[in-house]
Image (cartoon, grey):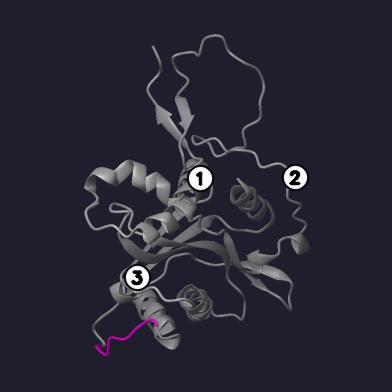
Amino acid sequence: ARVMEKVNFIQEHAPADYLIKLDLTLPGWVSKSLRPGDLKLLRRAINIFLKKLSPLLFHHKSQLGGFYSVHVWKTTKPLEPHLHVHLNLLNVAYHPRQKAFHRFKPFVDHYKVKIAWRASLSSVGLWDSPLASFLPDCHVGYIKLSHKEKVVSRISYVFRKPIVDINKNIDSCDTTHVDPVWIRSLLDYTPRQVFTGWAVSLKRFGFNSSKSILPTCPCCGEFLVYEYRLREIPPEIPWFTIDQGGGLVEIAPFG
């Protein structure tokens, strides 16, 4: 909910109208032999990538802003290690000297994204292939900020816990040779909400975070506020329950 609160603030106070989705993967050997310090190297690679990405989106000396999370598991087979990044950027850049936001077209060449991500990984030692034709797997997408339900869905997806995918896909997992230490780390893992660029500190733009964290509606994206209790729920009202990851999931009506 805090992330959605910040996105709403940005949309109201900056000319942003798109969220750029970038899902960035790493070589399999990094995931399988995750070393102490690799996550720190990965975060450094993300910062390098943002600098390389800027000239692909605009031609002035401004700063990108957004948020990301790091996942260490595979979605469909959550017991398998799969290190990847879910990066999300607003299509506005901030110029510190001018103290102004500049909106830019969010669309970017997917091939150039892969080139920039590979160079960023290589610069921190997380890429070892000498073949120029070998590129990391990257997925790029775009969401209009006016589509609140899609923005909420993206945020929920990015910051969900591994337990959500474990519960959903446990039948497709091979449990015969599972490392108990790895499973314990998965159960304890919570993706960090990391803001980057000009979005790191929104207080300078007038943002004041609410003291309480309100859940958001999965249909419209607005914050949920208790009004009253219904004895009977009208048939046109969808039913939701809270899953183990803390998210809202639509269910069939009881009875």
Task: Residue at 74% x, 79% y: name it.
Answer: 97
Q: Which residue is mark 1?
A: 152
Mark 2 vs mark 3: give the one in front: 3
Against 200, is 131 above or below?
below
Res 89 seen here: no
Q: Amino acid under label 3? A: Ser
**Image disc number at residue 211:** 2
Chain-order first, disc 2 or disc 3: 3
158 or 30, which is in the foreground? 30
Mark 1 vs mark 3: give the one in front: 3
Q: Which residue is mark 3?
A: 31
* SS at badge 2: loop
- Asked if residue 130 lies in the magenta stretch, the reply is yes
Against 208, is 97 above or below?
below
- Asked if residue 18 lies in the magenta stretch, the reply is no
Against 29, is 236 above or below?
above
Q: Residues within 10 Å of mark 2 (few under 14, many from 20)?
A: few
Q: Amino acid under label 2? A: Lys
Task: Residue at 28% x, 45% y: name it.
Answer: 170
**Image disc number at residue 13:** none
* SS at badge 1: helix
Range covered by the magenta-colored residues: 126-131
Q: CA distance from mark 2 to mark 3?
A: 37 Å
137 or 30, which is in the foreground? 30
* SS at badge 3: helix
Left or right side of 168 for 60:
right
Q: Amino acid under label 1? A: Val
Res 45 seen here: yes
Q: Residue furthest front?
A: 180
